[in-house]
Image: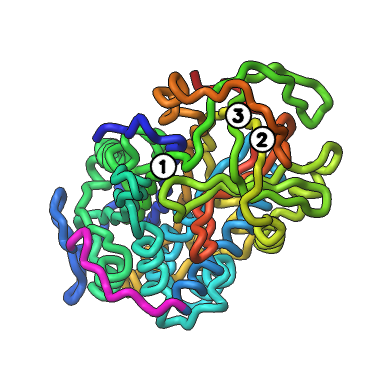
Amino acid sequence: MKINRLASTVLPFAIVVALAGCGGDNGSAPTPAAGLVATPVGELTRADAERAETPGVGVLDAAAAANNAFGMALFDQLAETADGNLFLSPFSVSQALAMTYAGAEGETAEQMAGALALAELAPGSVHGAFGALDRSLARGSDGADDDSERTFRLAIANALWVEATYGVQPEFLDTLARGYGAGVRGADFINEPDPSRERINAWVADETEDRIEELLPKGSIDNLTRLVIANAVHFDAAWRQTFERTGEKAFKRLDGSTEAVEMMSRRGPTPFGEGDGYTAAELTYRGGEYAMLLIVPDEGEYERVEAEMGVGLLAEAAGALRDEDDVALELPPFEFRSELELEAPLEALGMVDAFDPEEADFTAINPEAREHRLHVSDVFHDAFVRVDEEGTEAAAATGVVFGIVSAPRHSLTVDRPFLFAIRDRESDAVLFLGRVLDPGDQPA
């Protein structure tokens, strides 16, 4: 699949939740009991897109609110220990963990519900709401604007791999198929752990247009692995108003040092506003469904503003935006990747028992899961972001503005660390969150 050259932003994400048991020395597993579903190696036991009906708007709003609350809490945990730039997809993580939650019972389920901020959702509506959120977010994907050109593409895929000898409750498989369109594939984790890992990585690479090629590192799958749940998201969109490169400018790092970085600029109608210690601007993608919310703290205010990063700050910053005004904007293009292991931050959010072989309760997956000590062994998240002026390169050759004769009403030069969120403007669901402390190696 060819990546659209008109894309201003390409954002692929993938997350894998691997569940393992503690068996004998060779990782042997019992023959599936009667009533459980076995998945032969290489076969698909559930359709990839058998979806339930979309729930009402109120349920979707609650799912978006849960996604945002969880994402902000996870960002806070990661920001405390991460060095440098940080990027993640709250949506991708919450989707994969919601599928995992479908297999949890008892205290394990209660802890996961707390970590995922599911209080606003009735227990019976969780999977219908989370599963429908992706379809709502993808509305208009590959659609057309007034010029009959593509506006954006948002591709979301979910999948489950199950050890062929491990039986799974049919209700669990039905929930993943109806709620998330998750295809269920058989795997030979016992005899071919690394080839199985490679096949899962190949699926992720295909779903993310080869942006994420090795989500699961060597050694992450062994002969005790029993299930792998995966989510992949690929977002490809062009700016509604394009940029052009304008040369180098000094970018001020948090430690006071500076670095000469390339900048790109544009001038035109842009939602713009100021808050307590920051300036905010919204950069809309073609079609208008999605936008990047930039939050640029004032000099000396970055740590305080980042510490307040959360649903409240995003809502405040979005609320501070005035109607489109004439803004001259300079922004450094940037490209980086975050490869994250999420066990520690998830445990800090209260999801503890799921990682404990002695305490984990995934009996909704297999009624003997506690005897098998089925538990979450790893949660990997890999996120890549590239923001530049591509898609305007041809237009930039013919559309460079010369001889501006009026001064813009507002000017924002992003020459210092900043925060950004890409959100759905209708539901306010935050798909992606990031911070840029140093533009580093910039896209050519």
Q: Where is residue 124 in the image (x, y as percent from the top left)?
A: 41, 82
The mark nearer the N terminus, 1 or 3, is 1
Instruction: Give the secondary structure at mark 1.
Output: strand
Q: Residue at x 38, y 48 (%)?
A: 233
Mark toward the viewer: 1 or 3:
3
Could you tell me the amino acid type at mark 2? Ala
Query: Bounds of the magenta span?
Result: 47-57
Q: Residue at x 69, y 46 (%)?
A: 295
What separation in Å lies between label 1 and label 3 (alpha carbons)?
A: 18 Å
Could you tell me the amino acid type at mark 3? Ser
Instruction: Give the secondary structure at mark 3.
Output: strand
Instruction: List the residue tagged with mark 2.
Output: 328
Find out whether residue 240 is within the magenta segment: no
Mark toward the viewer: 1 or 2:
2
Instruction: List the residue tagged with mark 3.
Output: 265
Q: Position of residue 186 (x, y in %)?
A: 20, 53
Q: Is residue 373 above or below residue 250?
A: below
Could you tell me the amino acid type at mark 1? Ala
Q: Is residue 43 above or below residue 404?
A: below
5 and 225: which is toward the camera:
5
Q: Disc 3, disc 2: CB below 8 Å?
A: yes
Task: Using a 10 Å C-alpha cutoff, classify the residue at mark 1 as few (fewer than 14 neighbours), some (14 to 19) or many (20 or more).
Answer: many
Instruction: List the residue tagged with mark 1.
Output: 237
